[in-house]
Image: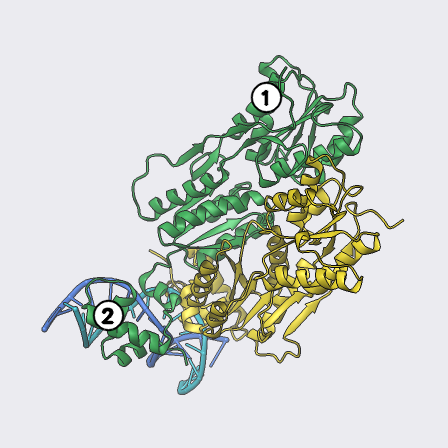
Chain colours: A yellow, B green, C cyan, D blue
DNA sequence: CTGTTAGCGCCTTCAC
DNA sequence: GTGAAGGCGCTAACAG
């Protein structure tokens, strides 16, 4: 039924070793033989069996990528960076979605490892001890992208989330705001949550602004979760004049909630956040935010992974990429 | 180095067949033996090699999904439906992004086939003869989801795009509009492009409204592409009082372009489209649109695929799912 | 219930 | 430059 390398060999009048050589681009084949083999392949419609090949060679030339949440556009952009570099080095990539469930992340990691991927990329999300445990049992290299592990022992590519948040809040402070609220992610999340909150705190601290508990609400990173937060802020007195959101999606929810309550952004309340997802320029007013270099995070982490898979020496296993404030219209210029 | 089934067998004092049985949940194993084996597995940290297993059993229990564009949130939702059903039937799914490039789609299809997936799901996009060709060489079942092939010979799950567009335009007509412009996708695209355009034409026709060429612009489905279209419409006289956009993302671009030009939605110009992506309820005004049952498209196509993989008989190979108008605020109620 | 024995399709020395 | 032969790690009859 299925045509194998053996069929091709017979058809071409050579041995399977030779067929294997031409399929694998081994130079030690006479051009004429190569041609014969290619013709036989064509005639038979032979398609190499990657599974058999993987078993024999103990390499699959594929890297597994776990995406915590496929509907989050950040990961889409990161994935694009990963892919471009992967193609460049002739790796296939297979994406596995984990639907924001830790338990599913672990399962997916194990599935990928069972499938004998040559390397693993773990995007975003929290790296718990259970994750670390799964990674530890891996015989192939793993790199974290867009996140890092607690004690920073694993290879990772990320931005400095604390500093990004710090910079964002300082844009607000520079614009004259002092009553600055924050919609945070869960503090259990070391990157998007805890670190960004720390950055907020430090910015206030260095500006001599006192931190008020009622100015901080925890969201779940989704649009909807920020409406409660903002409505809460709106009832406060003094009402905050600016909001720092840990992520863009929540910031957009904030902008709309402010507007739905009859107030204007940025005149009544300014909004800033961190991420720079595509949607940030699709809201009115457009969102001022601190951009993560998403494509680069993907590209650099894939590049790092190729080095690891090749056992090349790598100096820096924890790379931090620069971020940048993107000035748009949700914060008004300091006058 | 790596621990194999053989090591486990020795450690547990049984044969590899027995180990294989417990790993595969074969009931024909004495509980006590099973326990011994599990302990050995635990002790050795054994992880089954899916590649070897795939080679021996000629099944990989994984289905390949090609996503035309990972950054398009429609596919994210469809993927979720696919996954839920896949998990239910114990299939792993691996996603491969094709970046909207036809050539890459074909490549990805072949890679997936080489990897010996048990089935293939092809999401969205145009199905050209080259695609059909690639599918034809597949020895495993393929189902199209969110698209169909030209002569409808392949298994597919989709909505009736023509009818969806027709219904959308009729919402506009019911609201009293007669000067209705359309931002279309490319007419080469049979589903999102051509069919939706046909629906627009038919709605006008049945309402006795004459079709005007200058009322139709072609976009590329992206937000940015609709700004040109809308600016063009704004210069027309009579200026359209309503716009039907082939997709939500372009509709959102249209709304903002209208607003950026000092007009109001829906008072000055109404906007409607087809899709119902998450962002549709994240704009102001919220977008009235015809919802595609994205999750269901994914779920139903995966279910269909499982049947095909099991060689169960299936009556209906071309399933059409119902769509539904979602009334929000970008079209005002008929008075 | 458990063990033995062939392969699955290919890569990879090692000869020639 | 090419062929022969031995696995890669596991499943699937087939015995027992």
Residue at image location 32% in from the left, 65% down from the top? B56
Residue at image location 66% in from the left, 34% down from the top? B251
Residue B223 in sight: no
Which residue is disc 2 drawn over? Answer: B34
Q: Is residue A236 above or below residue B328?
A: below
Residue A329, percent from left and from top: 79, 45
Toward which corner of the image does residue A12 lie, by quadrant? Answer: bottom left
Q: Residue furthest front?
A: A237
Q: Earlier in the sequence, mark 1 or mark 2?
A: 2
Of A192 and A175, nearer the camera is A175
| Secondary element type, mark 1 | helix
Residue B321 in sight: yes
Residue at image location 53% in from the left, 33% down from the top? B291
Q: Is residue B304 above or below residue A183?
A: above
Q: Residue furthest right?
A: A335
Residue B328, percent from left and from top: 60, 29
Residue B15, percent from left and from top: 23, 75
Which residue is disc 1 drawn over? Answer: B171
Residue B3, percent from left and from top: 37, 77
How far is disc 1 from disc 2 in space, using C-alphas? 64 Å
Q: Please give the chain letter of the residue carrying mark 2.
A: B
Q: Please give the chain letter of the residue carrying mark 1.
A: B
Q: Is residue B166 above or below residue B335?
A: below
């Amino acid at each position: 039924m299925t045509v194998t390398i053996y069929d091709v060999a017979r058809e071409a009048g050579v041995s399977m070793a030779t067929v294997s050589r031409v399929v694998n681009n081994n130079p030690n084949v006479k051009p004429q033989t190569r041609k014969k083999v290619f013709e036989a392949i064509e005639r038979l419609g032979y398609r190499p069996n990657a599974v058999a090949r993987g078993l024999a060679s103990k390499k699959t030339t594929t890297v597994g990528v776990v995406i915590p949440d496929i509907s989050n556009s950040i990961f889409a952009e990161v994935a694009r960076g990963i892919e471009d570099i992967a193609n460049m080095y002739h790796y296939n990539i297979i994406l596995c979605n984990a639907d924001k469930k830790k338990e599913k992340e672990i399962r997916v990691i194990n599935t990928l490892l069972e499938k004998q991927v040559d390397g693993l990329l773990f995007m975003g999300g929290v790296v718990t001890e259970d994750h670390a445990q799964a990674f530890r049992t891996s015989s192939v290299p793993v790199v974290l992208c867009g996140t890092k592990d607690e004690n920073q022992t694993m290879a990772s590519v990320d931005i400095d989330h604390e500093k990004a948040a710090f910079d964002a809040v300082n844009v607000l402070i520079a614009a004259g705001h002092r009553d600055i609220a924050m919609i945070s992610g869960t503090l259990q999340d070391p990157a998007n949550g805890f670190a960004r909150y720390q950055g907020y705190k430090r910015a206030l601290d260095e500006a001599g602004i006192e931190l008020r508990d009622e100015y901080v609400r925890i969201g779940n990173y989704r649009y909807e979760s920020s409406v409660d937060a903002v409505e809460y802020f709106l009832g406060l007195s003094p009402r905050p004049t600016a909001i720092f959101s840990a992520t863009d999606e929540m910031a957009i929810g904030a902008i709309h909630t402010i507007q739905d309550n009859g107030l204007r952004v940025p005149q009544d309340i300014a909004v800033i956040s961190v991420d720079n997802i595509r949607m940030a320029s699709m809201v009115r007013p457009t969102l001022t935010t601190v951009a993560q270099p998403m494509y680069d995070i993907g590209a650099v982490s894939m590049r790092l992974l190729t080095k690891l898979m090749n056992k090349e020496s790598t100096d820096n296993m924890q790379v931090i990429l620069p971020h940048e404030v993107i000035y748009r219209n949700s914060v008004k210029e300091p006058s």
